[in-house]
């Protein structure tokens, strides 16, 4: 688990800031986002979904070299522009997150493709674990993890560059697109 600074959030079609002076290893991670709608702590499997307002898309942009240098993930994941979010929030009562396709494309090339059914932890388990001893508040956003295929895992690694267009799509939600600038 890790946190991202609120200043990292940008909307659809807004730029992902390159930060070339700070990182040479800029990476993407397409993820399902859970949006909390009702404050709660120590959620149970029985009531966890009662606290969900809806779902959206995030691109958990990461500076892999900063992540490694600082050991803690906060700095490598929290630079300004490192959390594209959107384009919409679908309500919890109109979306089943248990088995939907999450895909990421860079410049039109498919890099990630996987079902939420393959996530290490399902949405209920994530909510229960994150809320242990910690209050989740309405408006909090939880990213759920990413399918295989990030640039850092490629052989050799392939990192984002200025001008690259990253598109993350999730069935039933839409498509989030941002350009690296």
Image (tube, grey):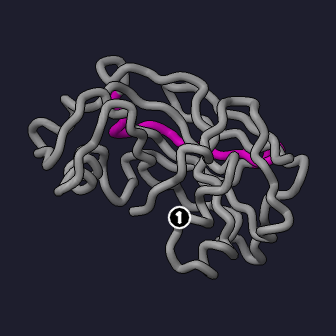
Examine the image and state in which quarter residue 158 appears: bottom right
- Residue at image mark 1: 74
Query: Residue at left 90%, top 47%?
Result: 163
Q: Mark 1 Cα within 10 Å, few/some/many (few <14, many 20+)?
A: some
The answer to whether residue 98 is left or right of residue 43 is right
Which residue is at 66% across, 71% downward?
Answer: 64
Q: In the rendering, at what x and y percent does residue 175 appear?
A: 64, 30
Q: Is residue 48 above or below residue 150?
A: above
Q: In the rendered image, which quarter is residue 7 located in?
A: top right
Q: Report the number of discs.
A: 1
Quadrant of the snapshot with the N terminus? bottom left
Q: Circle 1 sits in a helix, a strand or a loop, which is it?
A: helix
Pick the front one: 155 or 164: 164
Near-viewer residue (153 or 18): 18
Q: Residue at x 52, y 56 (%)?
A: 147
Assess whether residue 102 is covered by the magenta stretch.
Answer: yes
Q: In the displayed structure, would residue 27 be above or below residue 95? A: below
Residue at the image point whose x is 75% and y is 38% from the top: 178
Is residue 68 shown in magenta?
Answer: no
Image coords of residue 118 (percent x, y): 39, 53
The stretch in magenta equals: 96-109
**With 171 as the anchor, is 48 left or right in this view?**
left
Q: Is residue 96 above or below residue 161?
A: above
């Amino acid at each position: 688990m890790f946190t991202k600074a609120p200043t990292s959030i940008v909307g659809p079609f807004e730029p992902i800031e390159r930060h070339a002076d700070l990182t040479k290893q800029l990476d993407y991670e397409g993820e399902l986002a859970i949006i909390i709608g009702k404050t709660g702590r120590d959620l149970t499997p029985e009531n966890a979904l009662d606290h969900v307002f809806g779902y959206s898309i995030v691109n958990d942009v990461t500076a892999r070299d900063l992540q490694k240098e600082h050991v803690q993930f906060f700095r490598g994941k929290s630079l300004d522009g490192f959390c594209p979010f959107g384009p919409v929030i679908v309500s919890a009562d109109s979306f089943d997150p248990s088995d939907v396709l999450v895909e990421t494309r860079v410049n039109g090339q498919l890099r990630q493709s996987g079902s939420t059914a393959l996530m290490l932890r399902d949405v209920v388990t994530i909510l229960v674990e994150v809320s242990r001893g910690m209050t989740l508040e309405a408006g909090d956003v939880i990213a759920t993890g990413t399918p295989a295929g990030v640039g850092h895992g490629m052989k050799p690694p392939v990192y984002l560059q200025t001008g690259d267009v990253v598109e993350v799509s999730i069935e039933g939600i839409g498509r989030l697109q941002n350009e690296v600038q």
